[in-house]
Image (cartoon, rainbow, N blue to C red):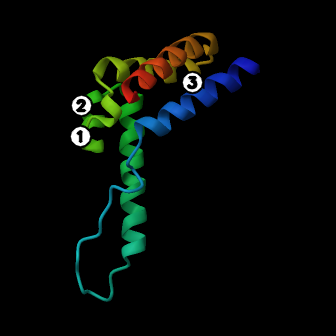
Amino acid sequence: MKKYKKAAINIAFLTFFLSAGLAGSYQAPLNNDADIDWNNDQASYKQERRELIISAFENNDYRAWRQITGRQVGGVNEEVFARFTAARAAARSGRYSQAIKLTERLKKDIAGILS
């Protein structure tokens, strides 16, 4: 159970990092139509993007992820992204030791990118 928790925490951290900018990336167009619910539109847009990002993770699709995020988040390249999706897949299939090993390396990669 301890390995599960560590893998889950590492994957959660990395998922948050690779999904960065999701919350602040939507800007409602200026429009004076009183019948438009901007808050609902924004929530719908964020949910759709969240689902597309998760789909890119599940399909190990770096190009789709990069297109969705609109930039290279934190300097994450295709190799780092592939390691993340491999770690995520390992954790989801119960191979926690492998997931932990991959995520520990990814955290070092990301720390190097951020410094």
Looking at numbered disc 2 in the image, what kind of residue is underneath it?
Arg
Q: What is the spatial separation of the Cα atoms under label 2 and label 1, in whole angstroms?
A: 6 Å
Q: Contact, CB < 8 Å: mark 3 with mark 2? A: no
In the depicted structure, whether residue 62 falls above or below residue 70: above
Residue at 59% from the left image edge and 16% from the top image edge = 100
Looking at numbered disc 1 in the image, what kind of residue is underneath it?
Gln
**Image location of residue 98, percent across then percent down:** 57, 10
Going by the image, does 104 lie left or right of 20? right
Q: What is the spatial separation of the Cα atoms under label 3 and label 2, in whole angstroms?
A: 22 Å
Residue at 36% from the left image edge and 50% from the top image edge = 49
Q: Contact, CB < 8 Å: mark 2 with mark 1? A: yes
Q: Which tag, 1 or 3, sits closer to the chain's start?
A: 1
Going by the image, does 2 lie left or right of 50? right
Element at badge 1?
helix
Residue at label 2?
Answer: 63
Element at badge 2?
helix
Residue at label 3?
Answer: 92
Where the C terminus falls, by quadrant?
A: top left
Front: mark 3 or 2? 2
Q: Quadrant of residue 80?
A: top left
In the depicted structure, whether residue 16 falls above or below residue 42: above
Is 114 in front, or is 106? 114
Q: Which mark is residue 8?
A: none
**Image location of residue 40, percent across then percent down:** 42, 71
Q: For label 2, count other residues whose C-alpha is less than 10 Å away and answer few (under 14), some (14-19) or many (20+).
A: few
Is 81 in front, or is 41? 81
Q: Quadrant of residue 44?
A: bottom left
Where the N terminus falls, by quadrant?
A: top right
Residue at 38% from the left image edge and 37% from the top image edge = 55
Q: Residue furthest front?
A: 115
Q: Which mark is residue 67?
A: 1
